[in-house]
Image: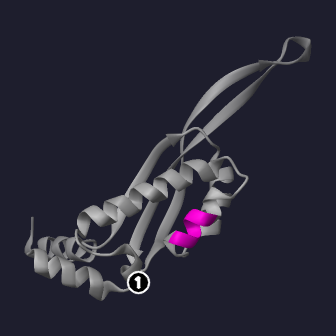
Amino acid sequence: MGARKRLRAEAIKEARKNLAIAKLNNCPTSPRKMRLVADMVRGMDVDKAMFLLRHSGKEASNRLEKLLLSATHNWSQKNEGANMDEAGLYVKEIYVDSARMLKRIQPAPQGRAHRIRKRSNHVTVVVDARNAEVAEEVNESNS
């Protein structure tokens, strides 16, 4: 690995130190339905987002609520001793990508067949602290 590439990799690693990422792969919901729920919580504080997901009528909100809870736990593992309320956690990024498609055949009239595509998706949630000083102080004291 060249010097520039190594320096760039170290800079990216340092920038991601306070981020917490959680992924949900092969979720059996169509990406379009999941994106509707993901767009609701993008950029929100974690507490508000959890409340909104808990009281939403969409089925995808249950899975997204668990994923967001996992991301907050990942953040607390990275920043031991930091208070989540003081840090002001928020949903920095959330994106939904399409995953594998299960292809099925539906019988149709006159000997024909229609293809049914059962879609699934991958969801990635990135949680960060608005008050970065709180997380930096804890990381410096742990080092």
Q: Position of residue 93 (x, y in %)?
A: 47, 69
Q: Disc 1 on helix, strand or loop?
A: loop
The residue positioned 39% from the left and 63% from the top of the image is 72
In magenta segment, residue 49: yes
Dot 1, how many residues are within 10 Å of its Cα: few (below 14), some (14-19), or many (20+)? Answer: some
Relative to 52, residue 60 above or below: above
Q: In which quarter of the image is residue 113?
A: top right
User: Please, what is the three-letter code of the amino acid marked with disc 1?
Assistant: Arg
In the image, residue 52 sits, relative to residue 70, either above or below, namely below
Magenta stretch, main secondary structure class: helix
x and y percentages locating residue 127 in the rendered image: 41, 69
Foreground residue among 110 and 72: 72
Locate residue 74, reporting x and y percent.
32, 60
- 132 left or right of 103? left
Q: Nearer the viewer, residue 103 or 50?
A: 50
Residue at 41% x, 77% y is 85
Q: In which quarter of the image is residue 11?
A: bottom left
Q: Where is residue 102 in the image (x, y as percent from the top left)?
A: 60, 29
Q: Nearer the viewer, residue 127 or 121?
A: 127
- Residue shown at 55% from the left, 75% from the top: 44
Q: In which quarter of the image is the N terminus?
A: bottom left
What residue sits 33% from the left and 70% below the top? 19
**Residue 97 seen:** no
